[in-house]
Amino acid sequence: ASGTGNNAIVDSGDEVTITLTYSSTGLVSANNYVVRDILDGRLNYVANSATWSDATGPLGEANAANATDQTNGGGQTIAWSYDNAQTLQFILSEVPSGRSGSVTFKATIADGAPAGIIPNTATQTVDGAAFPDSNTASVTVDEQFSLEIDDTKINLDGTRDGTVASATDTDAAANDVVTDNADVYQGATIPFEFVISNTSNVTDSYTLDVNNVDFPAGTTFRMVAEDGATPIVGTVGPLVSGDAVKVTLLATLPTDVTPVPTTEYTANVVATSENSGTFDSSTAEYTGAVLASAIDLENKVAGSEGDGAAPTNGGLPWVTQTTDPGVAVSFPMNVENGGTTSDSFNLELAQAIPAGWTVEFQTLDGTVVSNTGTIPAGGSKDFNVVITPTEGYPPSDNPIDILVSSAVTGQSDRIVNQLTINKVVDVAIEADQEAQAAPGGIVDMVHTVTNNSNVAITEGAISQSGLTDFSGAIYWDANQNGVIDATEVIVDNFDDLVDGVAAGTNGLAAGDQISLIYRVQTPSSATPGLSEIGTIALANTLNAGADIDVDTADNAVNDKVVIVSGDVTLTKMQYIDPLCTGAPGTFTKNRLDVEPGQCIRYQIEAENTGTTNAGNVRIRDVAPAYSTIHTCGGACTYSVYPAEPASSVTITGTTADSFHNTVLPGDFARLEFTVKVSE
């Protein structure tokens, strides 16, 4: 026996015709001829489709396997049967010698039948004796590519399989939409689990793409495996026909997304066959609320922590601290991350502090920072806000508006505290002087008065005392040139300082300073060796009793005047050489402020203002504290007048001495040297 089949390429569901052709080539008839065909599982027999070439009409299937279904004109019978288990059989009572015929039936390609060749081979027996099998007929099933991405598995026959379903879907199943309705915070990641089903008849792999429909701008999307963490790189698969796999879309909202009570964000997930380009899509939908990430700033002061919802305490500051000008104050603070993700927070002031003030945000070990660093969800960090007001800042109440903000979410919190600057009252005069005068001579000694207060001094006595035979007067050196000019007047009170605070207001402004010249007249009858000490004192009670000096140790100086036979006047002046290069400057008697590392050039003159020679004149000076005599690498060495060898100089690290034989009337001896202030 031989069989033929339709060798055309077909798809699932297509119908094929199978013909079993027999022929008796022997010399005698073949009796009790049995042909059996067991169909491949990928073929489904079409009921009542069998026919016999020797008769018309379909072969019956209701009879028993060996019951006659039809008879031909020669009296031969055929019994046809199908056992519903893929076995088809026909029995011919006789096949006469030289006769041939055929049995034909139909089958369909089963749904989901994998691509490839479906073979079909029949067996034959004659009176129970086996004869060779038929040839193998084949049907080639074409590759059919199809897939489903859904919230449940889709079987090959198109039915839904609820045993494999999205674990994140919060709406009704089997609607091709994966929904999440749980409320989230800014920057949260929302998971959407999908099921990819291979409904092809071949193994396939899939690429995944996400198309944002109306999630907020800045939302990022990642596809991960079923575990919700492992990134999907490349394709998903290979996935055999009829199998399914879960994948998860992670949608991460922007950290600065606007909080909203209701949402309807959607995105489409597209799965595409790597082998055919066939694709399917499903929808991710978020319907929960987007909540603001929480941040809380508080004072670390029991009872005055503050409330982030109310930066002020009913319009008042939460914490008030007091300090003197120039003295730093620390506000201990705590910031808490109440969000669901780690975050870091910028530290700043929401309101500018006065010009010249400084602010530092410090960790507890004193490190200056501008950001808290990463704080985990639910965690907190302590820090200090250190405010330093400028020297001399006037008494005042100053808001300290502290702000923490997330550069990630845009959320922020404020606390308003207050720094109160105390009133500080302190006037000072410097420095003690010692001068020589001839009988009947006059000496002028310059003093600097400084208002170290943060308020103006408009009234307060400036007095002298201690002189008996000598007489003295205090002049205001208004132009600070170190000499008494014709227009400069005697003063005995701060209110004599015309326009010293502002136009029309006498006194000494906060932080300002003036020069006073103490002129002492000696009697002509004074004998050499006689001396007196005059004291210049600034009152402790100032501004008509409204203010009291907090430091009285610097409120007076003592000037000693000694009568000598000659009349030698000693004058010391100075200027600053900031770079220690020996650069020339203008000498002055006035007080100068110098920085560490800078140099000061001193000039000391001993002038003979008498009428007789002054012999054995010596000038000696000691470098101030925290300084040493410096040569600037040779650029600022000492100088002396008269020049050496008429004079001689001895210099040590801190002492300068010069010796001069005779200074004639009207002439002078001079010594110049430089010191450097310690770094």
Image: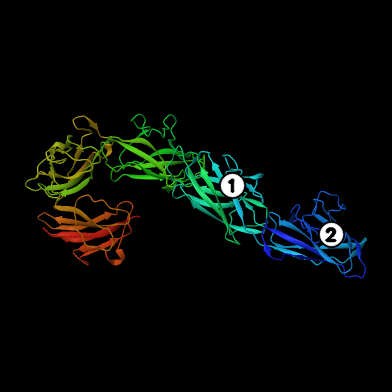
Asked if one can make out residue 86 in the rendered structure from this viewpoint, the answer is yes
Q: Quadrant of residue 525?
A: top left
Q: Relative to residue 392, is residue 275 depicted above or below?
A: below
Q: Which residue is mark 2?
A: 72
**Other residues around mark 2 within 10 Å, as few (<14) / some (14–19) / many (≥20):** few
Q: Which mark is residue 164?
A: none
**In screen coordinates, is 316 left or right of 173?**
left
Kindly give the residue lying farthest to the left in the view shown.
486
Q: Quadrant of residue 324?
A: top left
SS class, disc 1: strand
SS class, disc 2: loop
Q: Observer-nearest residue: 443 or 420? A: 420
Q: Quadrant of residue 126?
A: bottom right
Q: Observer-nearest residue: 155 or 396? A: 155
Task: Give the alpha-carbon distance from disc 2 to disc 1, as whole Å.
Answer: 65 Å
Residue 365 image point, x, y percent: 47, 45
| Eye-nearest disc, 2 or 1 | 2
For the N terminus, give its image quadrant: bottom right
Residue 598 image point, x, y percent: 30, 57
What's the residue type where badge 1 is placed? Glu
For the C terminus, give its image quadrant: bottom left
**In screen coordinates, is 577 left or right of 337?**
left
User: Mark 2 touching mark 1, by CB under 8 A?
Assistant: no
Q: Observer-nearest residue: 372 or 473? A: 372
Residue 144 image point, x, y percent: 64, 59
What's the residue type where badge 2 is placed? Asn
**Other residues around mark 1 within 10 Å, as few (<14) / some (14–19) / many (≥20):** many
Q: Which residue is mark 1?
A: 193
Which comes before the other along the chain, label 2 or label 1?
Answer: 2
Asked if one can make out residue 528 in the rendered structure from this viewpoint, the answer is no
**In screen coordinates, is 410 left or right of 102?**
left
